[in-house]
Image (tube, helix red, strand yellow):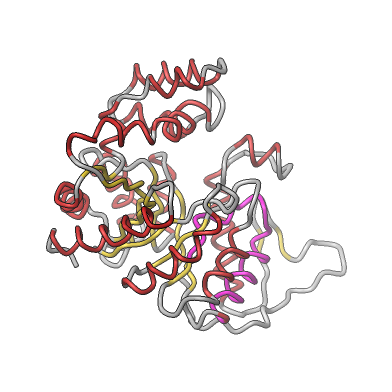
Amino acid sequence: MRLGINLGYWGAGMDADNLAVAQEADRLGYSVCWAAEAYGSDAPTVLSWVAAQTERIDVGSAILQIPARTPAMTAMTAATLDSLTGGRFRLGLGVSGPQVSEGWYGVRFDKPLARTREYVDIVRKAMTRERLSYEGEHWTLPLPGGPGKALRLTVHPQREHIPLYIAAIGPKNLEQTGEIADGALLIFPSAAHLAETAIRPLRAGREKAGLTMDGFDVCPTLPLSLGSLEDLPKLADTFRPYTALYVGGMGSRKQNFYNQLARRMGYEREAADIQEKYLAGEKEAAAAAVPQELIDSTCLLGPVERIADRMKEYAAAGVTTLSLAPSGFTLEERLAGLRAGVEALTLAGLA
């Protein structure tokens, strides 16, 4: 099992330290550094900045939002980053959510599975550097009846095949991801539930495409916080607002993918309670309602030995790249988390 680092969103309050974190991850042998985007910083700019000041670590988008760019623009960005980094770019895609898609980008959040499939088809076709033409439900290239021409990508990417990941949560999205992508980006992964909530639909998609799970990258992100066993409740409290935001407020009452995931993991009543409080504006109450067990099962908390045991569980469940998000109020605390990740991986016998 490999390790990655997830820097999250630029502008989240730890920006001055992010480059040092990425450079330390590069020095320690981490395989990939991911950056995210929502409606603030964009991922390609951050990834370019990181790649220019590191040597070996891959840089990946977790995610480039599908409603933010045409598929041809995404192909241009991927080819450019892969060329500039000497073949170190990984393309992560996702549909975002209805609030961001329709509120920020003005793109209807309809038929996300079909849109994702067409989007991936067009990106991959453009990357072959053949003339780009496509007839689908959501995109037609060139537009009919006009002056448009079927053009060819002029940038030569470093590699013929750039690894393509999709951020997936729901069963149908996971199955399609297994079918059309090279990897899956997961969030709130519980090792105890991963077989049912992620691996089973991913494998079904691979089988539909006549493939196995060999070579497919299962890549969840887990927050990490070091401490003693006695510190576990306090460490869990650190992530209460984060968990409450996603389970309670990241989406509407009817459409919150993270809330639905918590329910599939057995937290039906708790997920409903968190959402009810969060949407009523009671954010502190929503955070207090998050069960410690839910936080503990979707984060890496405690001493290195405990984290090593948890890593074994994730590897046994089918995780191939474990992306860490070390928490801390100082740069040194975050760097200590990075080093602890390597130490735990070695202790677990997974390095």
Q: Is residue 276 visible?
A: yes
Q: Is residue 68 magenta?
A: yes
Q: Which image quadrant is residue 281 in? A: top right
Q: Is residue 204 magenta?
A: no
Span of residues in magenta = 60-83
- Whether residue 261 sits left or right of residue 64 in the image: it is left
Horizontal and vertical percent position of residue 158: 51, 83
Question: Which of 315/293 is in front?
Answer: 293
Can you say which quadrant of the picture contains the C terminus? Answer: bottom left
Horizontal and vertical percent position of residue 111: 58, 41
Predominant SS along the magenta part: helix
Up-down relation of residue 225 to residue 151 (above or below):
above
- Whether residue 142 sits left or right of residue 96 in the image: it is right
Can you say which quadrant of the picture contains the N terminus? Answer: bottom left
- Counting labels gives 0
Q: Is residue 117 visible?
A: no
Horizontal and vertical percent position of residue 188: 36, 40
Residue depicted at x 71% and y 45%: 105
- Whether residue 142 sits left or right of residue 332 in the image: it is right
- Whether residue 344 sits left or right of residue 141 in the image: it is left
Up-down relation of residue 267 to residue 110 (above or below):
above
Horizontal and vertical percent position of residue 290: 36, 24
Residue depicted at x 18% and y 34%: 230
Question: Which of 217/323 is in front?
Answer: 323
Residue depicted at x 43% and y 56%: 331
